[in-house]
Amino acid sequence: MKPVTRIHSRTAVLADENIDTDRIIPARFLTTTTCEGLGRHCFNDWRYLPDGSNNPAFPLNHSEGKDCAILVAGRNFGCGSSREHAPWALLDYGIRAVLSSEIADIFRNNALKNGLVAIVIGANEHRWLLDNPGIDLSIDVREQAITLPGGNVLHFELEPFARHCLLEGVDQMGFLLQHADAIGAFEQQREAA
Amino acid sequence: MTAVRTLFEKIWDAHLVAPETPDTPAILYVDLHLVHEVTSPQAFDELRAHGLKVRRPDRTLATLDHSTPTLPMNADGERPYATPQAHAQVSKLEANCREFGVELHGWDSADRGIVHVIGPELGATQPGMTIVCGDSHTSTHGAFGALAFGIGTTEVGHVLASQCLLQRKPKTLAVHVDGRLPQGVGAKDLILHVIGTIGVNGGTGHVIEYRGCAIEALSMEERMTVCNMSIEAGARAGLIAPDDTTFAWLEGRPHAPQGEAWERAVAHWRTLKTDDGARYDREVRIDASQVQPTVTYGTHPGSAIALDAPVPIARNAVEQRALDYMQGRVGQPMAGTKVDMVFVGSCTNGRLPDLREAARILRGRRVAKHVRMLVVPGSETVRRDAEAEGLHEVFRAAGAEWRLPGCSMCIAMNGDLAAPGQLVVSTSNRNFEGRQGKGARTVLASPATAAASAVAGHIADPREYRIQEEQAA
Ligand code: SF4
C-alpha cells in the first residue's frame, strides 16, 4: 500500500442513506479474480442507463461530480456485504476518501486496509457537507483534520493503527507475521490444555 | 475472584494472542476459517506473491457456492456456468486448495453447499470458537455460541497466513426476546421484526447476544436464521448461548468431538453463557407475542412490517426513492401485491426445516400460473434429506423448480435471477436494489409466507393456509 498523508479535492455528494455494497458494485461483477479494473462498474446500475449511456440522474455523472476524490455520502454508507470489491471499485474509480455520519463496520475496515480513507464525522457537519456539494476540502491524515474553505478545521477520529498504516504505507500482514512466535506459543498452550 | 463477563467477552478473552493497546488492535486467534470462491482468489495470490503458506490448513475449510450453477451438467458433462469468469473463479479455488493443501468441498463432495450451511452440518462449527469467512453472513455460526464474523479479502489473506486477525474489541448489545411467538410465526418473522425495530444500523459496532425465553425455545435451524441476519442490523456478529438444544444437534457430526472428548467439550461449553450481573453496552427488549408474519416493503432489511400492516409514508427523499423503486402503495398492506417470482433457499432459509415449512403449504396445491418458483437447498446434505422425504416431489408437483444447492438468487451471480421490475418474494436476507437482478424488486419473507405467496400469486398470509389444512383435517 502507498502511504496516504493528504487528500485535497472537491467533494462529490451522494446523499442517499444506506448506500449498500450491492449499489457500489453489483454482485454480477464479483466473478473477477483480481482487484483491478472494477472502477468501470463502480455504482454500475445507478451510473448507467440500460442502453449503457450515462444516467443523468446519477450525481457523479455531472461535470461538478467528475474527478472528485472525496465522496460525501449519506448515513450508513457501505452497509451489506463484506466484499472488498467495494473499496477496490471506489479507489479504481478515483475516490480516495469517503465522509459520512455513519459508515458500516466491515466496509470501513476494508477501505482503510486499501488506503481509502473512510471518515466518520458529526451529524451537523455531515448535513452541511451534504447540502454543499463541490466544495474544496483538504484532509490531513496525520493531523486527523479536514480543512474547509475559509480555513475552518474539522477534527476526526481514526483508529491509531489504521492511521499509522495509512501514513507509513504499512502492510498489516507484515505486522501479523512479526508475531509468529506468539501465535505458535498460543497454539501450543491451547493444544496442551 | 474473576469478574463477571458476557458470553462475548469469554470467547474474546480466550482467543487473545495479544491484547489491544491504544496503538494496536488485538491479535485474535481464529479457530475455523471458511473459504469460498468469490472472496478468496486475491488472498491466495497475495500469499503466493510473498512466498507464504497457509498456516493451518486443518483449520481451513473451503466450498463452492456463490458462482455455481444450480442446474445439472449437460449431456457433455459440462456445468452451465453463467459466464466464463464464473467458471474461472471456481477453477481457481479448486487449484488454490490443491496448491495450499486446503480441504475443499467441491463438485464431487457429498457435503458441498453454502458455506454457512455446511460448517454447522459437518460439526465444524462449535460453541466457543472464533470463526471467520470472507462473507458477512458468517454471523450465522453465532447460533452455536461461536464468535463468528465476516471479513474482507485482505483479512482472508491475513488469516490464511497467520491464523489470526487484527481486531478492535466490539461493543455488546443484548436483544432480549421475551414471551412466545404466536402460532404460525417463525424465526424469520422474528428477526425481520427485530431489524425493523432496531434499524439497519442499530447494531453497528456491536456484537448482538440474543437471549430470553423466545430464543431458548428456538431450534438450531431457527437460531441460525436469527443470527444470520445480525449483519442486516449492522452488527459485527450475533450470538446465542449454547444449551442442550445445541449439544443434541452437534452430537455425532463428522467434525464434532467424539467419546470422552465430547463429554469434556460439553462440560466446557456449559460454561459459555453470560454471567449473572455482567453488563452489556446496550440492551433492547422485544416482545415475541407481538410478532406477526413479517415482510419488507423497501430496499433495505430494516423496512420490515407485518404483512397486513399499511406501508408507511416516506419521511424523506431517500425513503421515497425506495418506495418508487419498489412501486410501493402507501397506506396499503404488502399482502395482495402481485408476485412474479418466489425464491426459497439461501443460508438464511435453505435448511431442511425451511423446505418442510414451504412444502407443507405447497402439498396438494399449485404455484399460481404467472409465478415462477425456485427451491434451492442449502447443501447436498439438505438436498439428500429433502429428497429422502419426498419434498422435491411436492415442489415439482406444485410447479416449482427443484435445483442443485448454492447461493442462487440470494446474490444472483450464478445466472439465477429476476428480470427488471419483477417482484420476488424471497427467503434470503437482502432486498437491496438489484440484489436479485438489475431492477428486480425483492420482498424478504419466511419460507411459509413465500410458499403461500407462490400459491396465491400475490403476497399472502401463510396462516390462512394452515387454517385451511386444519379445517380439512
Ligand atoms: S446464500 Fe446469500 S447470504 Fe448466504 S452466503 Fe450465499 S450469497 Fe451470501
Image: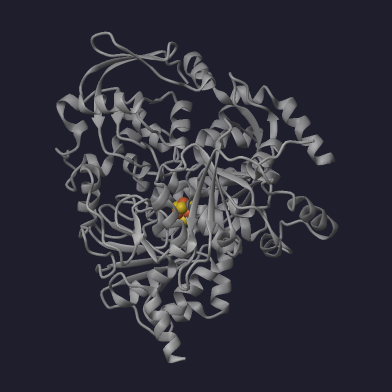
Residue in front for this viewpoint, B410 or B41:
B410
| Residue B468 seen in the figure | yes
Name the residue furthest front: B277
Q: Position of residue B278 (x, y in %)?
A: 65, 41
Q: Is residue B392 above or below residue B96?
A: below
Examine the image and state in which quarter residue B130 appears.
top right
Q: Position of residue B56 (x, y in %)?
A: 69, 40
Residue in front for this viewpoint, B430 or A37:
B430
Residue in front for this viewpoint, B200 or B158:
B200
Q: How many marks?
A: 0
Residue in the image at 48% along x and 27% along y: A113
Name the residue furthest bottom: B473
| Residue B406 seen in the figure | no
Q: Position of residue A49 (x, y in %)?
A: 18, 44
Residue in the image at 25% along x and 44% along y: A45
Q: Position of residue B87 (x, y in %)?
A: 44, 51
Q: Is residue B356 above or below residue A45?
A: below
